[in-house]
Amino acid sequence: MKKTSVIFCLSKHPDLGIWPEAFWINYLDEHEMSFKYEKAMPDEVENEAEYIKEGVKICELLNPVSLHKKFAPKVKMHPIEWVVKIKAEKSATSELLEDYFGNNLHRLLTILKDKKIGYRHKMDQHPGLQLKSISNQELDIVFHFERLPANTRYYIQITNNEEVKLHENVTLLNNSPCYVLHNETIYPVKKPLKGKKLIPFFRKPYIQIGIENEEKYYTTYIANTLKVFPCKLINIPLEKEYPKPEFKLVLTEDIRNGNPLLKLDIFYNKLKINHSHKSDFNVEVNENVVKNGFTFTYRDKPIEQKAIDLLVSTGLQQTIDDFHFSIENEKLLDKYLEFLQDHKTLLHENEIGIDANWNGMIYQTGKPQIKSKIEHKKEDWFDVQISIQIGKFDIPFYMLKRHIKDNNRQYILPDSTVFLIPEEWMAAFKDLDRFGKKNEDEFLIKNIHLQWFNQNSKIGNFLTFDKEKTKQIFNAEIEKTELPLNWQTKLRPYQLKGYEWLCHLHKHEHGGILADDMGLGKTIQMLAFIKKTKQELTENNEKKTIAVENESNVQLSLFDTPIQQKKHFTALVILPTSLLFNWVDEIEKFCPDINYSIYNSSKKTQNSSNWKKFNLILTSYGLFRNNIDLFREYPFDMVIADESHYFKNPNAKIFMSLSLLKAKRRYAITGTPVENGLSDLWSQLSFVNPGILGSFKSFKESFIYPIEKLNCQSTKEKLQTIIRPFILRRKKQEVAKDLPELTEKVIFCEMSETQNELYEEEKSRYRNMLLSNISGDDSKAGNFNFHVLEGLNKLRLIANHPQMTFSEYEGDSGKFNAVIDTLDTLTQEGHKVLIFSQFVKHLELFKAVANERNYEFSWLTGATKDRQKQVEQFQKEENRKLFFISLKAGGVGLNLTAADYVLMLDPWWNPAAEEQALNRAHRIGRKNKVMVFRFITKDSIEEKIRKMQINKKLLSADFSGSSNPIKQLDKETISELFN
């Protein structure tokens, strides 16, 4: 049979009642239907209109087989029998089934009504007969309650311009939402009536309530109906009153999520109105209701609205309904209590009371007072004595410690009332809690944190202590310190200051991070400090030896303390493998009297008992991590971690291993203490001075988020104050007078014609793909950022040479030609050149040309095994003019002072990586002036990146360097990059 159209029918089943079905039917001509039909299934209507597909799907959902499968798949019973059984029950399943059926039937009827296609009956007849309509007009409903001498009658009147008699030709189709069938037309009934209320009136015109049940019926059913539906009272008294409303703003709980809310309660005649009732009056049941009836207390909605408007004017936001309010983006009860305290006067002036009780707790609203005193306990610690006066109670600060740590501002007083710790106290005292510790009845704070207390006005306003003393401890000028005996090398002025700074920290028993720019001689400063520390220990040993000799003839009693043995100085240096020989060279050059040993598992030094023979134990990060059980047991006098950004990840095993070391002092060396974010800073400072920044969790909450996400200047200044004494960072430009001159030149390269065509084609493709979504809220979501980076990288590759991303490309490249010309000129003139690129593929293009022209060169990428050999050959072999280096492999731990030219082939976001590369050639102690050529493809992504590098430098200056490309790009910047 040819299927030509889908029709929808309401079939009447003898047991199931009304049931929706969909059928295929064939038209013999424009008006006449065939008598052949068959049921329409969802998989057969894929090519039909959406509303047809949706309607057929609903019919399928509501057939007995589908219902049985959904609600009782494990019940072995015929589907129709199961549905009939469940409909006859009063159970949770029957209610779920009724709601499910009713809501889906409502969806179907709405589709048919909206599409104006009507429906058909199938009462054991052809489904194509009896086309019926679905009305857009809802039936009005009025409840009638009539008091008679012997009883009360109740009936429901529904109208459609004229009264519809329920007991005459009316069929209930759906309970909720309510639909009825009247005179072959389906009508929706006005909400919130449920169809079951109509069923009694299908059999009789009214319901009669006997005298014995009237009291209960009036106080419950009639009273509740009056609140919801239009009603007509006949012979039942009704009074009307218009009292003045009273208001109270109450803390309550949001039933949707448990968060606090403010609720405006409104009272008329001491009776609180129900917020869910939208009627203009409140229904009160009078005493002896059958005789005296009801009272309608009419609401003064203009006055109610005035109170609502006042609350909205304070910044509150309406939620749930007009009478519930929230504070924007706030879920904490504390903020709601603060609101009530801050607006108490305003609310009182407008006759709005306050209920500050919540969940049975009573909150204090008085202003607390602080009493404080801080005494110097010993060199490292201060005793902080603070008490809080709250009414009649005097609470020691340490009793609030747990609340501050947990960010819980609610403190229960002895009388069970609740004191809300002020927000400004939380901000000020959280650092006390973060850095302090409870010791019996004392609350102790380390002296390394007092400089911040001295300069922070919030704590300064609350605490009383000797601020001048803290200045002496932390802000004293770094005293001049003589260089070690037999030190043969003259330190530059800034190197001498670095050496004295290290000695100053050591004297005050602190660790620190030497974070000078690459090439400024951090290793030599550290070696001078190590040698000085070793000599001071030796001097102390000699004094003790003299004392021992003077008392050598004294017989010790059983109770005397044995004379301490001579102490040997042993320090551990942990460093990248690539720096190992650099350290060895500098030790032998500057400190030949220092005994050192390179640790590896194949040597006898794997036994820590041998370490006391040496002043320095050198090992790589990898060996240290893998043998931590050995290193953690040895009591080193000092630990130095070179290139400390290697353990910038607080969760990395290497950082956790470092934290296990037993060492009196810890120091770190790095050129980039912060590469990706402030978390780098936490791990390194926590290594050199454990506890200085608190736990990583609190550091994230207190510093990382406010600074990196919110750019909070005050938090940034706070952090700088805390860390300033323990990080020494000098940039190259700060000590430029002591360094060889460095000249930089930008060479702009024009793309070749074919290169430019390919570049513009790819740029347009990515721009169309990315910028279409850039206005969305999720424009920085993971997938978007991935495609942005993908696009930027591809454009960079094309700007260098299209062959780097399109192997079939046969054209040339403007930059490639310019670089080759430059290399030819420099090699012919006898210069030594470093060629840096972030892309190994890029270097390989020039490597091929170098091989063709028989240029001798060195090569260093992440895959290079003989790094030291490549470096030594370039440094020592006169004919080896070129050194190709990938930025990633060459940014750390290389001395390449033989070069006098540096070519930077491709720029990127963080100029720090390029500057590190430059420092490979621009090292102290060399005589050559360095010329740097930066190759930038004109009108390309490279030129835009170079302009943006200035902003990256500003961020880097704040916390010693940072690089994280896409993280900080805004929409305008992304748009600019692809224009």
Image (cartoon, rainbow, N blue to C red):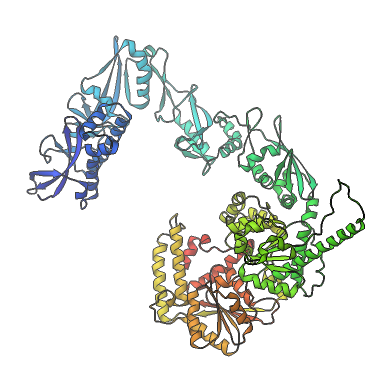
Quarter that holds the C terminus: bottom left
Q: Nearer the viewer, residue 421 or 808?
A: 808
Q: Which residue appears farthest toward the bottom when viewing the image?
A: 828
Q: Pinpoint residue 958: horizontal percent, then vertical percent.
A: 63, 61
Q: Judge whether 791 appears above or below 452 on screen.
A: below
Report the label total: 0
Q: Judge whether 685 appears above or below 102 on screen.
A: below
Q: Pinpoint residue 684: horizontal percent, then vertical percent.
A: 64, 59
Q: Pinpoint residue 762: horizontal percent, then vertical percent.
A: 40, 71
Q: Judge whether 105 appears above or below 713 on screen.
A: above
Which quadrant of the figure has residue 599? bottom right
Using the rendered image of the protein, determine whether residue 918 is visible from the camera's viewpoint.
yes
Q: Nearer the viewer, residue 549 or 544?
A: 549
Q: Judge whether 321 appears above or below 677 on screen.
A: above
Residue 54 as seen in the image, left or right of residue 806: left
Q: Residue at x 67, y 38 (%)?
A: 400
Q: Nearer the viewer, residue 647 or 65?
A: 647
Q: Nearer the viewer, residue 187 or 374?
A: 374
Using the rendered image of the protein, determine whether residue 519 is visible from the camera's viewpoint.
no
Q: Pinpoint residue 297: horizontal percent, then vertical percent.
A: 43, 23
Which quadrant of the figure has residue 145? top left
